[in-house]
Image: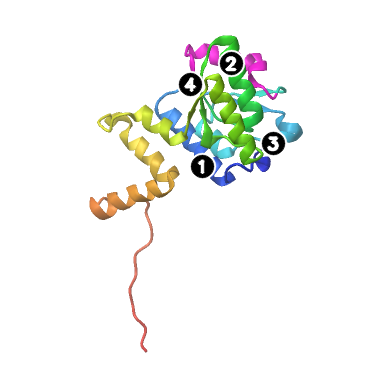
Amino acid sequence: MAFGVQSIDRQTLKNNVVGLAKAAKVFGIPTTITTVETESFSGHTYPELLAVFPDHAILERTSMNSWDDQNVRDSLASNGRKKVIVSGLWTEVCNTTFALSAMHDAGYEIYMVADASGGTSQEAHDYAMQRMIQAGVVPVTWQQVLLEWQRDWAHRDTYDAVMGIAKEHSGAYGMGIDYAYTMVHKAPERVKHGDRIGPNPADK
């Protein structure tokens, strides 16, 4: 399904989805992974995402609307929570139908992660987000979710894990963290590498 996404760079999309998944794992957020028609045409879920939750069941369904699958409903109900954070493909189809149905039928409060979801065009994604917002869905971004969960840098039990996610998935912000750690605070680099050799100017 990612092949059809045109609203966001697909590598960025995968990066953001995996970053969001890692954040959920760090903060112990119950997570449901669901796929549609995997073997027939949709293909498998990102392996990088599955690697975050290697023991999770993957709820296969036929409906484009996840809410139409009883296993998905049961998984959400078993968490005992009314707030649901959603990312998926495509924004204008699976995301929208699930969000509207879950709100209407069961009173869930839906937070749609706009940059961890993708539509078949920019217009498809944008108008789907607008439609959901008009219905009461709360738009968020993956890094916003991560940092709202962290909330306070004094929460040391999750600090290092959050910084690790940011370094790996937050682009220029992550680069800046690495720079500040190593160049300003003189922390060791976070990867081992070969000896630094040189400079050794050649004879002219």
As measured in the structure, the alpha-carbon distance from the residue carrying label 2 to the one carrying label 3 is 25 Å
Residue at label 2? 102
Q: Outermost residue, left direction?
A: 185
Residue that lies at the very extreme toward the right in this rendered image: 40
Residue identified by numbered label 4: 30
Q: Quadrant of residue 165?
A: top left
Q: Secondary structure at mark 4?
A: loop
The answer to which of marks 4 and 1 sits earlier in the sequence is: 1
> Which residue has dot 3 on it?
43
Q: Residue at x 59, y 44 (%)?
A: 10
* Region of the chain picked out in magenta, as a range: 64-84
Q: Earlier in the sequence, mark 2 or mark 1?
A: 1
Q: What's the amino acid at mark 3?
A: Gly
**Of the image marks 3 and 4, the number of the one nearer the N terminus:** 4
Residue 167 drawn at (x, y percent): 39, 45
- Mark 3 to mark 4: distance in Å? 24 Å
